[in-house]
């Protein structure tokens, strides 16, 4: 009786390791035949987007409707089924600010008006110098501020707006560790690690980016009155979401959580105003 020839083991095309199941045990890449047609490529892409085990949709669903859940899951060690917190925050923040930049014509940061009429035939450069001539600022970087004023007057503030929107995501990312430090003061007993607070703020800010984008999309399709009602509902939901996320992650009662939410909200607003002011000044100085 002749021996049955052994079937050669499949190898991962990514790392070359032997693969005995659907996924490579060394690098995690899925074993599948090469893509040779548009139909095959479309099937693979559709499966990645709609598969029941897709981390993307599982993460976004939990982020929208389960306050504090992703933070608690990550701290409990159940991490493989969800997108990593930093990646989730960065992706949503990039998409959010790209959307804000694409619609900056509707939400201008600054607009230059001239209430004086210049001489006939005045050039754009002459108009800009005239608008910025009567400056009352004599502090540091006076010349830089003057140059920024002239440039903003030339393009009606568009360059300053673009610089501000470019710098704001980085400022917000630096803003998160400051908020986490404030949470250390509010949650001294029982003791929590700094990274727990940082994870909570990463997830909560990612949630704000996501729901804001969904509200933009819905508001564009609704009448003015319905759009105003939608923004009010979103604002209330965000407040409840933050409160609920604190309860889920830290496990404290309603009254104590609400008592800690009040000083946290005040600190958040004060820090946000300071962050926006610093970002605005930096945007002017680097214009």
Image (tube, rainbow, N blue to C red):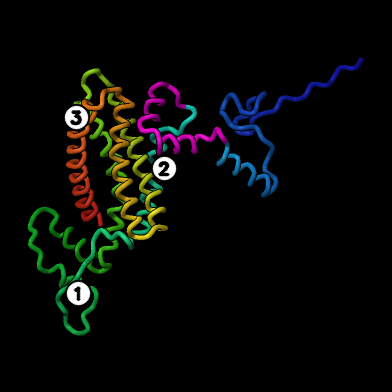
Cα gap from disc 2 to disc 1, whole angstroms:
41 Å
Left or right, residue 69 beside residue 261: right
Of marks 3 and 2, the one in the foreground:
3
Q: Quadrant of the C terminus?
A: bottom left
Label 3 residue SS = helix
Label 1 residue SS = helix
Magenta segment, which residues?
52-79
Foreground residue, 236 or 32? 236
Q: Return the residue at label 3.
A: 259
- Which of the 4 image quarters holds residue 200? top left
Label 2 residue SS = helix
Q: Earlier in the sequence, mark 3 or mark 2?
A: 2
Foreground residue, 146 or 99? 99
Q: Residue 193: x percent and y percent?
A: 28, 22
Rendered position, 152 above or below 75: below
Q: Return the residue at label 1.
A: 127
């Amino acid at each position: 009786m002749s021996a049955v020839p052994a079937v050669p083991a499949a190898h991962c095309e990514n790392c070359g390791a032997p693969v005995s199941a659907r996924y490579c045990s060394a690098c995690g890449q899925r074993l599948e035949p090469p893509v040779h047609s548009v139909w095959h490529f479309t099937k693979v892409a559709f499966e990645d987007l709609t598969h029941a085990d897709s981390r993307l949709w599982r993460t976004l669903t939990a982020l929208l409707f389960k306050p504090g859940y992703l933070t608690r899951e990550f701290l409990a060690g159940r991490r493989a089924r969800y997108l990593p917190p930093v990646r989730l925050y960065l992706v949503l923040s990039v998409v959010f600010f790209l959307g804000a930049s694409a619609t900056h014509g509707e939400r201008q940061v600054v607009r230059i008006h001239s209430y004086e009429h210049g001489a006939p035939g005045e050039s754009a450069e002459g108009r800009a110098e005239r608008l910025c001539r009567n400056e009352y600022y004599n502090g540091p970087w006076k010349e830089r501020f003057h140059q920024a004023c002239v440039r903003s007057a030339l393009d009606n503030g568009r360059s300053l707006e673009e610089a501000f929107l470019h710098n704001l995501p980085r400022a917000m990312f630096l803003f998160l560790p400051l908020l986490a430090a404030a949470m250390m003061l509010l949650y001294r007993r029982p003791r929590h690690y700094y990274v727990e607070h940082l994870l909570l703020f990463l997830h909560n800010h990612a949630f704000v980016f996501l729901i804001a984008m969904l509200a933009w999309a819905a508001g564009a399709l609704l009448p003015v009155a319905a759009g105003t009602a939608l923004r009010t509902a979103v604002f209330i939901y965000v407040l409840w979401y933050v409160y609920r996320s604190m309860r889920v992650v830290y496990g404290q009662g309603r009254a104590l959580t609400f008592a800690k939410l009040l000083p946290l909200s005040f600190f958040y607003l004060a820090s946000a105003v300071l962050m926006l002011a610093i970002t605005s000044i930096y945007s002017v100085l680097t214009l």
